[in-house]
Amino acid sequence: MNAEAPWVRIVIVNYNAGAMLQACVDSLSIQTMAAFEAVIVDNGSTDRPVTNLELPDGRFGILPAGGNLGFAAASNLGARGAAGPWLAMLNPDTRPRQDWLAELRAATERHPWARMFGSTQLSATDPTIADGFGDILSAYGAAWRTAGGRPAVELPEMDCEVFSPCAAAALYATPAFLASGGFDERFFCYLEDVDLGFRLRLQGERCVQVRHAEVLHEGSAVAGYLSDFAVYHSYRNRLWLSAKNVPWPLLPAILPLQAAAIAFALARRPPAFRRAAFKGLRAGLNGLPEALSDRKDIQRMRTVTSAAVARMLVWSPFGRQVRLPYPIPPKL
């Protein structure tokens, strides 16, 4: 094992990931950049004892959470006490390419102004298909991974700047992550990464999507795609995301758009989806006082203008058809 001090702490939050967790750990064990430590936070998994996990060496450790804290709180727990300059979040349903960490480290040297970096996610079942190329946020309240489902050959060959990284495989500067308080633990899971990215963007930080830092991603392998659980948390958390982060001058334009988008989306969904969404929206409204309380501190720390925030968002109602992020031009 490389004796170099850990450059990055990798936090893996596990909840019933089964054999996928072992595959993720095995992929990390053969990274060409060996200067890392990995903390596996187990959220009270019931599918198989996490103690059966085969850890490759002393760089890996297991931290029992004592129950299902959710992704946000468990990630913060795993990040606590990190001494290295960088923190990486990695889902247990990912398998990083062998040079994943080396590519991320090189990107931090190419773009020293950035404090957030995203990885290129490829479909684990068909790596010729992109699973995500950075998170994008719409003025209509929805967020998604750009390029999902598109041929990987369409991805830019250069790094790009995006709104925020997807926390399935993301890198954050440790001081920025810890100073921000990490992920909002009330979110439990879903949109907590976009919320953190938004808060950091409001303070002038930026995010680079690293084209050649690749991971294979199962995608919704644990929670389930469009499950009641996913729908509930997504609709609840989108209310808090906007309530906390959107500057006042933009709210008169954004709130009607978001209300119309929710009404339009739910009208086209089956009854089970609508029931889960309405439960999430009710919970979101009930939690608004606390979100608005947080908003005071967030907006007080904002250093960018409302116009700059507006330029970060996608305003087209056909947002999912927007083009891929523009590559960052090389230095002259």
Image (cartoon, rainbow, N blue to C red):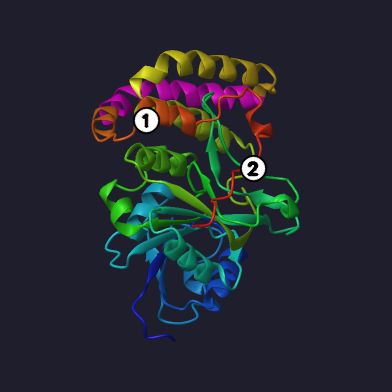
Residue farthest along the front direction in this orientation: 332
Pointer 1: what residue?
245
First-in-chain label (2 vs 1): 1
Main secondary structure of the magenta stretch:
helix
Q: In this view, does 132 lie above or below 212?
A: above
What x and y, as percent, mark residue 178? 29, 53
Magenta span has 291?
yes
Q: Which of marks 2 and 1 is in front?
A: 2
What x and y, as percent, mark residue 332? 50, 57
> Of helix, strand and loop, which one carries label 2?
loop
Q: Which residue is drawn at 66% across and 16% down?
A: 267
Q: Which amino acid lies under the numbered mark 2 shown in the image of this protein?
A: Leu
131 or 271: nearer the viewer: 131
What x and y, as percent, mark residue 223? 58, 46
Numbered badge on residue 165 = none
Q: Give the range drawn in magenta.
A: 272-294
Q: Residue at x 39, y 68 (%)?
A: 8
On-image quarter of the N terminus: bottom left
Task: Tell whether 275 sits left or right of 254.
Answer: right
Magenta span has 232?
no
Q: Which amino acid lies under the numbered mark 1 shown in the image of this protein?
A: Asn
Q: Is residue 169 above or below residue 2?
A: above
Pointer 2: what residue?
324
122 or 160: nearer the viewer: 160
> Of helix, strand and loop, which one carries label 1?
helix
Q: Residue at x 61, y 66 (%)?
A: 19
